[in-house]
Image (spheres, coloured by chain):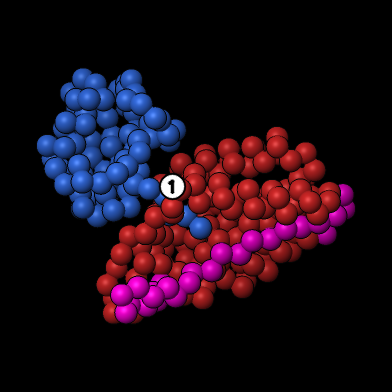
Amino acid sequence: MTNKYLITGPVTREVLNDLMGSFGEDLSAGGHSLFIGQVRADSTGGRRVSAIEYSAYENMVNKEADKIIEGIYSSFNDVRSVKIIHSTGVVRAGEISLFVLVSAGHRRQAIEACETIVEQIKERLPVWKQEIFEDSTREWKSNNFA
Amino acid sequence: MEITVLFFGILAEVTKTGFRHYSNVRSFEDLKLKIQDEFPETVHYNYRIAVNKELIDSDPLIKDGDEIALLPPFAGG
């Protein structure tokens, strides 16, 4: 792992196992909310996505993700811990590119905080993606915040 | 002053580089002109600016050694 929030390639089952291993460590937590983002095989104009290549401004990702998490702790006083892992490099369709885990004392804040983090990741993390189609053509994509 | 400019996403592709150092930069406006002179294609793309990894919304006051990043619309998740 080159960065505390970034991993090269997909979030593999082994990585998921490690990340999930923290369940139960904090006995004051009563609920965990988990979001897993998967690369979708979208089709456009007769072409199907086979993978996505992510790139990132790594040092700024660290800074922004720290700020997102600080904001969560100040808005959700029941949240106990947050984990965020995002892929860089190539992730194939069906593989996992984003992992967010929020633990809280009770379910409500775990669920709401997890949703807030996913939205903020899409809006604020300096990450870019290029879809790679089955015919090897490529296209830049961006998140829509109109 | 000397400024490092970083290019990301589609801007790294069209400029065919990840970064450039510019010297004798007098202001942010001057820096923008230098970038446009060297990479005229960048004017066709939307991007935001980060100075030393902080997003800014208006033209910044820059100082020697600053890292200026040109950030196309984000696409994380």
Q: Colour of chain B?
A: blue
Residue A139 at x, y = what percent? Answer: 30, 64
Residue at the location (77% across, 39% down)? A77
Q: Quadrant of residue A134?
A: bottom left
Tell whether A68 sits left or right of A52.
right
Residue B41 at x, y = what percent? Answer: 16, 47
What residue does disc 1 label? A146
Q: Which chain is red?
A: A
Tell whether A90 sits left or right of A106.
left
Residue at the location (57% across, 71% down)? A12
Q: Quadrant of the N terminus of chain B?
A: top left
Decide: is A111 above or below A48: above
Residue A107 at x, y = what percent? Answer: 80, 54
- What residue range appears in magenta? A24-51
Residue at the location (35% across, 73% down)? A44
Q: Residue A38: within the magenta? A: yes
Decide: is B51 above or below A111: above
Tell whether A138 sits left or right of A117.
left
